[in-house]
Amino acid sequence: MNEVLKAIKGRRSIRAYTDRQLSPEDTALIVEAGSFAPSAHNEQPWHFTVVQNRQLLDEMNEKAKALMAQSDNEWLRGLGTNPSFRASYNAPTVIVVSGREGAISAQTDCAAAIMNMMLAAHSLGIGSVWVGLLWPYLHSSDAKTALKIPEGYTPQHAIAFGYPAGDLPPAPPRKPDIVTYLD
């Protein structure tokens, strides 16, 4: 099997990390991989904010939890009131991907950049997980300022990166009957 297919099949969402910070070189390679994602009309409508400041990461997590604690959704409310829950799973690095407002397909293009970054991280022995539960914070009024999001961009998603604390989990079974071939 070729290396790309191995990486795709071997990458896992990691939710437990060591305290070891990513090197500046590896961080740059991960971000560069994101910048090589395909985009509609080659707009490349993304902006990457690399957060490695522990105080800011703690603030992001606490503000996300506070917003989740106010949710109408029981599951989200439970996470928001859980004192040990951290949306970023204590990862030493979180990258926020923002999309340019008015771009043809910013959200999809940013998602493609994220997948490139997650695969690049895996190839470097770095774990990652798409952290959707930071979404309440990313869409709060103070996130753009705290994260220094450029004018004209909106935070879309966040990804946690770090060295896995333990072995990679096995792949869950794949769902059957997901393809229809039309000849």
Image (cartoon, grey):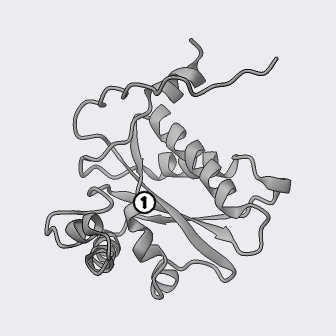
Tally the numbered discs. Answer: 1
Q: Is residue 127 left or right of residue 148?
A: left
* Residue 181 versus residue 58 in the image, above or below: above
Q: Residue furthest left?
A: 83
**90 over 141 or under it: above or below:** above
Quadrant (top left/top right/bottom left/bottom right) for the C terminus: top right
Q: Nearer the viewer, residue 94 or 135?
A: 135
Front residue (pair 26, 99): 99
Q: Is residue 122 left or right of residue 48?
A: left
Identified at 65% across, 67% down, the residue is 99
Circle 1 Cα neighbour tier, 10 Å, few/some/many (<14 / 14–19 / ≥20) = some
- Residue under label 1: 132
Quarter of the rendering occupied by the N terminus: top right
Residue shown at the point (56%, 44%) measured from the top left:
115
Question: Residue at 22% across / 35% down in the picture?
Answer: 166
Instruction: Give the residue type that dot 1 points to.
Output: Gly
Image coordinates of residue 28 in percent, x first then y, are 55, 51
118 on left or right of 60: right
Q: Residue furthest top?
A: 1
Residue 69 lies in what quarter of the image?
Answer: bottom left
SS at mark 1?
A: helix
Q: Outermost residue, right direction?
A: 41
| Residue 32 location (% of width, % of height) | 63, 49
Q: Is residue 72 above or below residue 156?
A: below
Point out residue 182 in the picture as x, y percentages from the top left corner: 78, 21
Residue toward you, 53 or 131: 131
* Residue 155, horizontal then vertical, whole percent: 56, 71
